[in-house]
């Protein structure tokens, strides 16, 4: 009888260990699934097209009005946002080729109550969450607006 009790306790302990181990493995998988779901949701966040068009037009206007530096080419433009308090500040970050220095410089254009443009440094861009937008389309958008403004 004593062997049966020992056998029952051992079997119960093994069953309990397996149950806990399976449950822990299931929770790990659920956690991984939830984490990947959150990531995919964040990557699907987009910048409204009206905001992108405003930032493109603002960047082009600023390059046209404030010289030097004179922007002769634009590249690596991306759009995103910074969370400030309870609001998102949308921005575009990129590089322009300066005619005067003949080198690429960074720029940031931020939508505020109007807009602000910063030449050199990219501290805002380092803090930004970027959305999935084609860099070539954004770069070409600024270049074409700048071409129209120069005429």
Image (spheres, grey):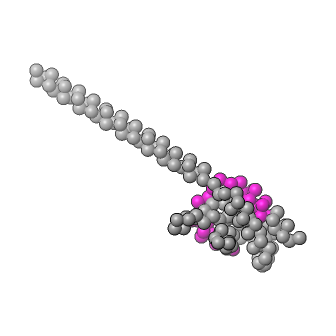
Image quadrant where residue 143 sits: bottom right
Image quadrant where residue 23 sits: top left
Q: What residue lies at 18% left-to-right and 29% top-to-bottom?
A: 9
Split into 4 quadrants, where in the image is the N terminus? top left
- Nearest the camera: 9 or 53? 53
The answer to whether 12 is drawn above or below residue 54 in the figure is above
> Left of 44 or right of it: where is 19?
left
Q: What residue lies at 72% left-to-right and 65% top-to-bottom?
A: 54
> Left of 142 or right of it: where is 6?
left
Split into 4 quadrants, where in the image is the C terminus? bottom right
Image quadrant where residue 136 sits: bottom right
Q: Residue furthest right?
A: 151
Which span of residues is magenta-colored? 119-143
Whether 79 is among the magenta residues is no
Q: Residue furthest left?
A: 1
The answer to whether 100 is drawn above or below residue 39 in the figure is below
> Left of 83 or right of it: where is 72?
right
Q: Can see residue 98?
A: no
Q: What residue lies at 44% left-to-right and 40% top-to-bottom?
A: 29
Q: Position of residue 83 (x, y in %)?
A: 55, 64
Q: Position of residue 16 (x, y in %)?
A: 27, 33
Whether 140 is among the magenta residues is yes
Q: Position of residue 51 (x, y in %)?
A: 68, 62
Q: Position of residue 37 (x, y in %)?
A: 52, 45
Q: What residue lies at 68% left-to-right and 54% top-to-bottom?
A: 133
> Left of 58 or right of it: where is 16?
left
- Nearest the camera: 138 or 99? 138
């Amino acid at each position: 009888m004593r062997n049966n009790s020992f056998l029952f306790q051992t079997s119960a302990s093994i069953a309990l260990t397996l149950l806990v181990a399976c449950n822990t493995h299931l929770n790990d998988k659920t956690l991984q699934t939830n984490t990947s779901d959150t990531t995919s949701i964040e990557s699907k966040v987009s910048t409204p097209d009206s905001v992108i068009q405003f930032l493109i037009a603002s960047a082009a206007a600023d390059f046209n009005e404030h010289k030097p530096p004179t922007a002769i080419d634009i590249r690596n433009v991306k759009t995103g946002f910074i969370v400030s308090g309870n609001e998102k500040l949308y921005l575009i970050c990129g590089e322009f080729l300066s005619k005067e220095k003949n080198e690429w410089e960074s720029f940031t254009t931020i939508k505020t109550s109007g807009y602000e443009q910063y030449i050199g440094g990219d501290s805002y861009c380092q803090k930004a969450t970027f959305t999935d937008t084609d860099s070539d389309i954004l770069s070409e958008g600024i270049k074409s607006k700048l071409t129209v403004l120069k005429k």
